[in-house]
Amino acid sequence: MQSYILRFSVNCKVNFYLFYTVIARKYDEAISLFSRRLLRSYLTRNDEIICRPTYLTVSLVIISALTFLFTSSLAQQTPSEDDYYQIITLPTPEDVLLEVGGLTTLPDGRIALCTRRGDVFIVENPNMYEGTLPRYVRFATGLHEPLGLTYRDNALYTAQRGELTKLTDTNGDDKADRYETIYQWPLSGHYHEYSYGPKFLPDGSMMVTGNVAFGSEEWWRGESRVPWRGWTMRITPEGEMTPWATGMRSPCGLGIVDGEFFYTENQGDWMGSGGVWHITEGSFSGHPAGLAWAENENSPIDLTEQEFYAQIDMRQVKKNGRYVKPENIADEEDPDFLFEASKTFPEIKLPAAWLPHGILGISNSEILVDESEGEFGPFSGQLLVGDQGQSKIMRVSLEKVKGEYQGVAFDFRAGFQSGVLRMTWGGDGSLYVGETNRGWGSAGTQNAGLERLVWTGKTPFEMQTVRAKPDGFTIHFTQPIDKKSAEDLNAYSGRSFIYKYHAVYGSPTVNDETLKVTGVKVAEDGKSVRVKVDNLRQYYIHEIIATGIKSAESGHSLLHPTAYYTLNNIPDGEKLPANEWVTTRLKETSQSTTKRITPQAAITTPDDPNVNTAAPTYADIEPLLVKNTCTACHQAEQRQVGPAFKDVAKRKYSDEKIVELIYNPQPQNWPDYTPMAPMPQVPKEEALQIAKWINSLDD
Amino acid sequence: MESLSLDNLSAFQEQGGNWMVVGSVTVDPNTDIHQKESASEKTKKKKKKKSKKSEDTSSHQGPVHYEAGTGILLNMNDETKKDHLLTTFEHGDILLELEVMMPKGSNSGIYLQGRYEIQLLDSWGVKSPRYGDIGGIYRNWEEEPGKIYMGKAPLTNAAKAPGLWQSMKIAFQAPKFDESGNKIANARFVHVDLNGERIHENVEVPLPTGGPVENNEVARGPIMIQGDHGPVAFRNIKYRLMKESDVALSDISYKVYETASTNIDSLINAQPVQEGVINQLTTDLPEVDDDFTVVYEGNFTTPEAGTYQFKMNYMGRAQLKVGGEAKTELGNFDGYKVQNDLTLELSAGETPFRLVYLKETPQWDTQIGLFSTDSYPRPLHNPNAYQPDIPETGPIYVKVTDEPRMLRAFLDYEGDQSQRLTHTIGVGEPSGAHFVYNLTTGTPVCVWRGEFLNATPMWYRRGDGSFRPRGAVQYLFPSTSLANLSDANAPFPTQLNEAGDWQSNGYRIDTETGSPIFLHQNGRKTLEDRIRADENGKMLTRTLTLTEGEPMGETYLKLAEGENIQSMPDGSYSIDQQYFIRPTSSESVMVRTVNQKQELVAPLQSSSFAYSIIW
């Protein structure tokens, strides 16, 4: 575009009025003033200018140039996450490897962290006052992959692989000299038996969770070989342990919300997607491995493995004398759902908020409540949830409906340099983020690290929260919305869906139904809108996309326009009468910026000899990759969560084989990566195009 | 492996009489062989009380005491009788295993082919071993430039204390000569292990070492054991003679079929997509990539009829038919890194073979290798068809610098994953003596000297949560060491990872030394467990102190267990002649037999008890 300007000398007189309208930013008016007729006659599509050098032409061209520059910068002014929350990386000395497993805050503003290689460091000056370096003091060493750290009363508590340990510095030299075993639990020695925690309950006891192991021949099936793998344990500082709940598979993130214990689960066998669970004593969150110990003396769970498998299919299949991994059944007639199972097994606890796999993370980690009372932005009281695979943080806002927690989840901040595993608050309202990705890979450029997230003080235009209503939802915003954009039913879209409850690794979304949005009512103060949805379905995840809504002040769209509400209960109460709803739909011109992508009609018929059968280009394929969420985990050149497409191409699969693998991925083909979930929802023609493009990368 | 009989000396050539076959040997580790006779006379008197008078059945010389019998080869040289010992057999390529016991200050050596010496010496406690220390490849004494060989030091000092059995494993490859007798390949130690630790990795010996039977290099020679430098004992000598064969593959043709199919017979009648003739077994053929079957046909050629050994390594499925008979099976699914060991009867000249190789797992490499294994593996295939795996990453080591270092992880007891201990901690001391302690059972589980730990198994990618000690590891025993017993004969808990009544309470750090002090609790009683190395790293001393509560005699400590616990003149106990336990006070220590095993046990009767582990 700069070429337009360069071709003209500066001597031209510019139409003052045009210039004024440009300055006044009334672009629409300025353009409409001249563009349609005159611009078209004087400017061509390619960069050559054919125009008479009148001042009018000149000013037109300058207007266009300025407009372009302004609109580009306007486009640059479309806010990004970085405008509201900035990521600062803490530098570390060469010999300090921070594969962070635990992170906590000390009363004097220092941060303490533990690493997967067994060290505990205290970080002095973590907020790098006046640009000075943070300092790392090795407080303790030699622990067995500790995956949690909490400070309490002059001691640090950590869950190692095999015990809950209390670390104390008795002589004040900033080195732990007492490594006290609070409680030791059994281990079978399987690599996957990670243990996490602790987090303190208000009564001073601690919560610790533990991963399952996996079978030898049935390597995909989680199993609990020794007590209490796949369980949550409650342990007092005096070392008394009570088994608290089971159903855990990979309970990496622990959090205390309203004094209650919550945890995040990771997608895997029996777990269709990750999510946030509220766990009370005697809960069963879904993975049956831990039921092996249900009959132990102090177990609060009555449900046994036999009782469970009498109702739910174990999917144990032998082929040629060997057990084979169960696969997702395409077009399954009557799949099981966790909510259905909960009617047979009252111990089952549904997640308070599903975090749809691939969209809101793939290996959910730490839960941390924003207790900053406004110092960290407009989300006080809400939950931040980390993700180790997509190296980002999501946001969850909960409410209680009919006595149970449920709520909504959003994206919050992406772009961390490695997988987000742990978080803790700095004394100044900033957030410290501990990272590692060893063993599973992640988005980002690093394998480990410590970063800090700081609120810039500017309030982002976001859905602050979503509340369930008897007839739909109320969306609350962080800033007043533009009424006109909100009163257009076309501004809202979405669907509801659910995951299967089966022994297969992960689940596609099933029973998808487009949301029937039939009315809206904007509140007086413009800070919320009630949305009428006619096809609410209890237990389903409701995806609400509000791309059409604009901020009243800035005219921007929402920073994160998509919300996922887990509707475990539909509240009772008054439905709004019909006459209170606005039901207008504006013309589809000002459509959502996330276009409803339709694959191009570039799928050629093989008969036509003139047709170019070359592989699609990246430009062709990018919309498909985005629409089908491939880009959540893959990139063309670099490993992210999944292998680079270029590396997939090196395997020299046929196009058809790639399509097969999209529908039924084989994680054993990529042993050092987080397993890929089956994606049967990708239409066959699109999958074939994607496969063709992937294979073209290996030429 | 063949056992070399030690019922008598018939496996060896005639010698001056310093070598003999005996039934048992006990060596006093504190007496040097060079000490004057008078010092040893005193200890001899103690011994004489126990031993029978007859000179046939037992005898005693310096620190060495032996009893008549068979199974142990013993050298007791003096000024007149000091011959080396030579085997009657001669060898080329050989695998040799033996156990050796060195008295203090003694010196011997094992000469492969009578020409290439692996040194035997009492090198206990040497920090930086040289070619002249135990396990070293000795130098020669030539002076002419070009003929001097300076020997090679062992990679680490894996020596144990005098008076203990030490295991050695030698894989040796003889020098190779052409038809004119010119040497075309040096003699080579393919690997040498001492006490389970690798001390030479694929090292050539370009010249004979000092004092060979003859100063030349040959295809075959006897084993020679040095007998003029001091007493030395051997047992459990095993060997395998190997000779590389001339077998080769020839006249190879191939046919490639479109898909992987186990129905070979139907395939044979189908039309191959590619076929041809090759001069070496190769996978670099068109159409051989992810889903294929290739059928090779050709001949084994060998000048002599006989039995030949092979191994076949591949990814996928393979079937070898020799002379029409199938020697391996195809199976129903692709195998990952399969190895088939084969023994084939081949006739002189040509024996036809058919090799079917197929694979349908695209992400696994296409690999098939056929090796002649009459001696060390010799490839019969083109290198592109099969290469052994190259390690993907360098190891991740944990080192000890100037203060003690700790690391908790799983430990596979005796390297056996089915005996995985789950609550163990490795402690490395700057003096170079390290140990692993089982926090659940209160037991030091194993000890070693040298480098500290290899943490690659736990810190590379996801890891398996375990580490490996680096060095010659002496395993003690894995089960409970500290328990309350109902009486002096009650057994200790025996399950792996099973605790007794004493509960582990973690440890605290001794602020002066930086070493851990392990803490155990039983009701109101607290026990502190300290394990410290001496400055040479030659022993670890364990001190248990009751800091709270009164000792009431019901708490017992197991110091050792084994088949045969022997008390020694200095108050220590030899545990199967593998390591020594020396209690500081011998008062309450007793040897008892439980479940056909001997145990060294002591009740904790005072508030402190200490003993040393010497190895």
Image (cartoon, helix red, strand yellow):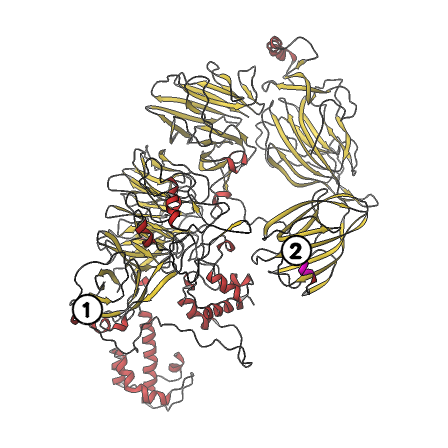
- In the displayed structure, does residue B391 sit left or right of residue B228? left
Q: Which label sits in the foreground, 1 or 2? A: 2
Q: Residue A249, can we see it? A: no
Determine whether A593 is above or below A214 in the image.
below
Q: Identify the residue under disc 1.
A: A522
Q: Main secondary structure of the magenta part?
A: helix
Q: Amino acid at mark 2?
A: Tyr
Q: Amino acid at mark 1?
A: Val
* Bounds of the magenta segment: B262-268
Q: Secondary structure at mark 2?
A: strand
Circles 1 and 2 on the same subunit: no
Q: Residue B71, can we see it? A: yes
Determine whether A218 is above or below B166 in the image.
below
Q: Identify the residue under disc 2.
A: B357
Q: Position of residue A619 (x, y in %)?
A: 45, 72
Give me the chain letter of mark 2: B
Q: Residue A108 appears in which quarter of the rendering?
A: top left
Determine whether A68 is above or below A280 in the image.
below
Q: Assess disc 1: are there few (<14), some (14-19) or many (≥20) residues with their C-alpha within 10 Å of its C-alpha.
A: many
- For residue B114, the mark is none
Determine whether A293 is above or below A628 in the image.
above
- The residue lying furthest to the right in this view is B180
Q: Residue at x 60, y 10 (%)?
A: B50
User: Disc 1 versus disc 2: distance between alpha carbons?
Assistant: 71 Å
Q: Position of residue A280 (x, y in %)?
A: 28, 45
Name the quadrant of the N terminus of chain A. Answer: bottom left
Q: Is residue B265 magenta?
A: yes
Q: Nearer the viewer, residue B219 or B497?
A: B497
